Image (cartoon, rainbow, N blue to C red):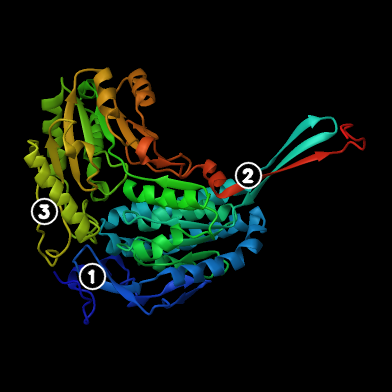
């Protein structure tokens, strides 16, 4: 596999001229500290490889504790003044950021696709579009934010003020590099904090393109981005006693390490971790072959969104036994119609996995599913696409049929792999849905509103999509039950994850209490 940068520039498969966008990356990116790009103190770099073709597309800083300290120095110097800015100023900044991203939407979408391997149509219509919306949402919410006054008695009042935490650390995953950064940056900035952010080493570059575009809109030192490996840069940030909060999105094992580090420093932590989400299809969905049923088929195929690299991926489908054969026949045909190809083409629906490591993990589960006795209904192999893409990281969208006790039903694969089983009644559907250590997302599909409500309330998950899936609006709280995490992302409640509440208890009575 060619993992070395092409001295003649990107290969033909990475041509972006049909999108009216130039190749978005510079040959090398330092860390973004105090409003400027600076070289890593160690002088070390690592190559960023695109999943599209397997070739190197740029170099990024391989940072360590010294770079984290430099970023923290900048953040601490800038945080006090920024924390005192008015809500109006912060709101205006967030709206300007949103506008700037919108003006450069296609450039950022191409950068995201090249960095992550996802189809350009998703980068345009989901990742970057949602990033814009989230900045605008928090820009609006913070303008409407208010403290409170409580009358204790005629002469005593409790005033409640919101104050930023100060300097916060954020560690971002590789499945939605820009969007996951925005999920954390927007509320943190709205609340008045300074940030030190570490992207995933698998997708380090698209966020640097973003920071280039935003550098003049954000006060120096307020957002600092440090690239590097988890054990070198990530560990230094997560164990630092100079941050007031740590926010992490990633897999559950790493989340445990992050939480331990936060507990040792007695700081709050937000963890958005793994999932094994059930997607439940009740028998009444086939009462008519109409638009709603077509929507259900789309909901079944949603496991392939972002190549299945979504924490809430509907990776378990539970189908009522009365419709199993007929429904799966139609559903598998829908999966077979998925177009896989060059992620830079708008017609492509499934792109490449984010890294060789992830591809190897998924192919291992494809082998395991067959060994467990699950039936392959479609897919089941790595994909060879030709046209310069053979060194990219591609997996066929795969549907297994088996039992919920199998490992492919219980363990997070994080790829375009769906495991299907059946249920006989509502109680069994709920039991199977909850038979997992995770509790991040779930889906319920039915024409009966009462059924939808009962089942939605009974499922142990932080978000239950009902007759829909994979919507991520800014004004809807997102987070997990059980081993899927702690805390929430999005919604105005997120502001309170990034600030303290100051209570001034004031007596206007000139007389003493009389105790002493």
Percent position (x, y) of residue 223? 51, 64
Q: Are marks 2 and 1 in contact (CB under 8 Å)?
A: no
Above/below status of 26 relative to 314? below
Above/below status of 297 relative to 37? above
Question: Residue at 13% across / 50% down in the picture?
Answer: 364
Mark 3 element type: loop
| Residue 485 falls in image quadrant | top left
Answer few, some or many: residues within 10 Å of disc 2's Cα (few below 14, many 20 plus, some between 14 and 19): few
The answer to whether any part of residue 78 appears in the image is yes
Mark 2 element type: loop
Q: Earlier in the sequence, mark 1 or mark 3?
A: 1
Residue tagged by mark 1? 15
Is 103 in front, or is 70? 70
The answer to whether any part of residue 251 appears in the image is no
Above/below status of 14 relative to 305? below
- Badge nearest the viewer, 1 or 3: 3
Residue tagged by mark 3? 382
Q: Earlier in the sequence, mark 2 or mark 1?
A: 1
- Badge nearest the viewer, 2 or 1: 2
Percent position (x, y) of residue 311? 32, 45
Kindly identify which numbered label has been placed on residue 511.
Answer: none
Is 352 in front, or is 360? 360
Q: Quadrant of the N terminus?
A: bottom left
Question: Residue at 39% across / 78% down in the picture?
Answer: 42
Residue tagged by mark 2? 145
Is 46 in front, or is 342? 46
Relative horizontal placement of residue 22, taking residue 473 as reference (left or right): left
What's the distance in space between the residues labelled 1 and 3, CA to CA? Answer: 24 Å
Q: Are marks 1 and 3 in contact (CB under 8 Å)?
A: no
Percent position (x, y) of residue 388? 13, 67
Residue most toward the front?
516
- Badge nearest the viewer, 2 or 3: 3
């Amino acid at each position: 596999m060619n993992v070395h940068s092409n001295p003649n520039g990107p290969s033909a498969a990475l041509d972006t001229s049909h999108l009216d966008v130039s190749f978005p990356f510079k040959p090398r990116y330092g860390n973004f500290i105090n409003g400027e790009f600076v070289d890593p103190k160690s002088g070390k770099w690592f190559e960023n490889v695109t999943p599209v073709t397997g070739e190197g597309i740029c170099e990024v800083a391989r940072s360590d504790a010294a770079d984290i300290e430099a970023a923290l120095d900048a953040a601490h110097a800038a945080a006090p003044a920024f924390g005192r800015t008015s809500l109006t100023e912060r709101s205006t900044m967030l709206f300007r950021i949103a506008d700037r991203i919108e003006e450069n939407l296609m450039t950022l979408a191409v950068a995201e696709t090249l960095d992550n391997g996802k189809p350009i149509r998703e980068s345009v219509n989901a990742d970057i579009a949602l990033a814009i919306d989230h900045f605008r949402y928090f820009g609006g919410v913070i303008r409407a934010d208010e403290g409170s006054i409580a009358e204790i008695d005629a002469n005593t009042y409790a005033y409640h003020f919101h104050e930023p935490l100060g300097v916060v650390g954020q560690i971002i995953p590789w499945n939605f590099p820009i969007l996951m950064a925005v999920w954390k940056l927007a509320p943190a900035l709205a609340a008045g904090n300074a940030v030190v952010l570490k992207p995933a080493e698998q997708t380090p570059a698209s966020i640097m393109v973003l920071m280039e575009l935003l550098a003049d809109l954000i006060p120096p030192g307020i957002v600092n981005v440090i690239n590097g490996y988890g054990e070198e840069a990530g560990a230094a940030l997560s164990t630092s006693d100079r941050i007031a909060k740590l926010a992490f999105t990633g897999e559950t094992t790493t989340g445990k390490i992050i939480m331990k580090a936060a507990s040792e420093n007695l700081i709050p932590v937000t963890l958005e971790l793994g999932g094994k989400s059930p997607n439940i299809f009740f028998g009444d969905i086939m009462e008519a072959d109409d638009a709603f049923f077509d929507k259900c088929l789309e909901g079944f195929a949603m496991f392939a969104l972002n190549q299945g690299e979504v924490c809430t991926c509907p990776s378990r489908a539970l189908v009522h036994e009365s419709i199993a054969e007929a429904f799966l026949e139609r559903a598998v045909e829908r999966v077979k119609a998925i177009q896989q190809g060059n992620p830079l083409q708008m017609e492509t629906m499934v792109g490449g996995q984010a890294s060789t490591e992830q591809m190897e993990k998924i192919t291992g589960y494809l082998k395991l599913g067959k060994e467990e006795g699950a039936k392959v209904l479609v897919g089941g192999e790595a994909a060879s696409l030709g046209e310069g893409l053979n060194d990219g990281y591609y997996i066929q969208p795969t549907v297994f049929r088996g039992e919920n006790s199998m490992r492919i039903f219980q363990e997070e694969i994080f790829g375009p792999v769906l495991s299907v089983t059946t249920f006989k009644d509502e109680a069994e559907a709920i039991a199977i849905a909850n038979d997992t250590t995770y509790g991040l997302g779930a889906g319920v599909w039915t024409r009966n509103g009462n059924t939808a409500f009962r089942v939605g309330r009974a499922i142990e998950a932080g978000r239950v999509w009902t007759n829909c899936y994979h919507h991520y609006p800014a004004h809807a709280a997102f987070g997990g039950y059980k081993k899927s995490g702690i805390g929430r992302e999005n919604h105005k409640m997120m502001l309170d994850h990034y600030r303290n509440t100051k209570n001034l208890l004031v007596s206007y009575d000139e007389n003493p209490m009389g105790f002493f």
